[in-house]
Amino acid sequence: LGQFLALTGARLNGAECKEVGIATHYLESEALEEAKQRISENPDRIEGILGQLSGKVPEARITNNLDKIDKFFASDRFEDILAALEADDSDWAAKERDTLGTKSPQTCKVALRQLKEGAAMESFADEMRNEYRIGHHVLVMHDFLEGVRALIVDKDNDPKWNPPTPEDVSAEWIDNIFAPLSADEEWKPL
């Protein structure tokens, strides 16, 4: 699921977050102000307050697609995910393949590696150091600048990625994005 969300940019609503275990409770929008007030007055009673204010969880749209997500987004190789979607003749697979076709191949490969490595990191500081390194390198690279141009500046929604295909994004290219910074540039916790 994490790989699906990271690659497609799909968003989960409240019911979906509850369904997949990201959220512990489901509250209707109308209950949020009361929840905040009651929690600020009784921070030691969060679980009980949320339990009292929880509403009936609507059907989660994602439920019908979890098996497909597990099947098609299981690999940590972007090319494998694309090939699996391409090989399937369902409308769902075609839609997701089309979505991935609009994304920067470099960014997709970075996201998959980030998820894989992040799962093995021992601390939040390690994860933040990795995030900072990636951001430091990516902010000056073509695809970031091109994405900003295409989506924010010119608004033509027609980015020209470089490298243009997943096969053209080498392991060395991605290694450079994850490369450590000099000692004075590395992220350090305060």
Image (cartoon, grey):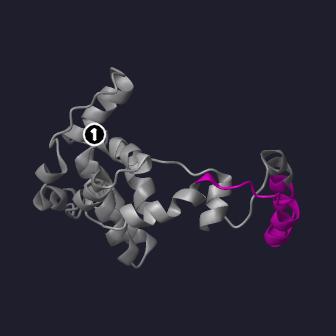
Residue 145: which quarter of the image? top left
Query: Does residue 1 show up?
Result: no
Amino acid type of the residue tagged 1 in the rendering: Phe
Magenta stretch mostly in which secondary structure?
helix
- Residue 175 or 124: which is nearer the viewer? 175
Q: Which residues are magenta?
A: 35-61
**Residue 118 drawn at (x, y percent):** 37, 70
51 left or right of 106? right
Residue 22 is drawn in which quadrant?
bottom right
Residue 46 visible from this viewpoint: yes
- Give left or right: position of 27 versus 135: right
Tell whether 163 sits left or right of 54: left
Tell me residue 92's x, y (percent). 44, 49
Residue 172, relative to residue 153: is it above or below? below
* Residue at image location 25% in from the left, 61% down from the top: 80
Crowding near the residue tagged with mark 1, few <14, some 14–19, many ≥20 C-alpha atoms within 10 Å: some
For disc 1, the marked residue is 144
Element on which disc 1 rests: helix
Q: Nearer the viewer, residue 158 or 175?
A: 158
> Does the magenta run of residues contain 41?
yes
Q: Residue at x 85, y 65 (%)?
A: 49
Q: Residue at x 37, y 42 (%)?
A: 99
Query: Considering only vertical position in the picture, is 170 above or below 141?
Result: below
Q: Quadrant of the C terminus?
A: bottom left
Q: Is residue 182 magenta?
A: no
The image quadrant of residue 158 is: top left
Taking the spot 12% from the left edge, 56% from the top edge, the residue there is 170
Image coordinates of residue 169 in percent, x first then y, are: 15, 52
Question: So how many labels did they put on this image?
Answer: 1
What percent of the width, then of the height, locates residue 183?
22, 64
Q: Is residue 57 left or right of residue 170?
A: right
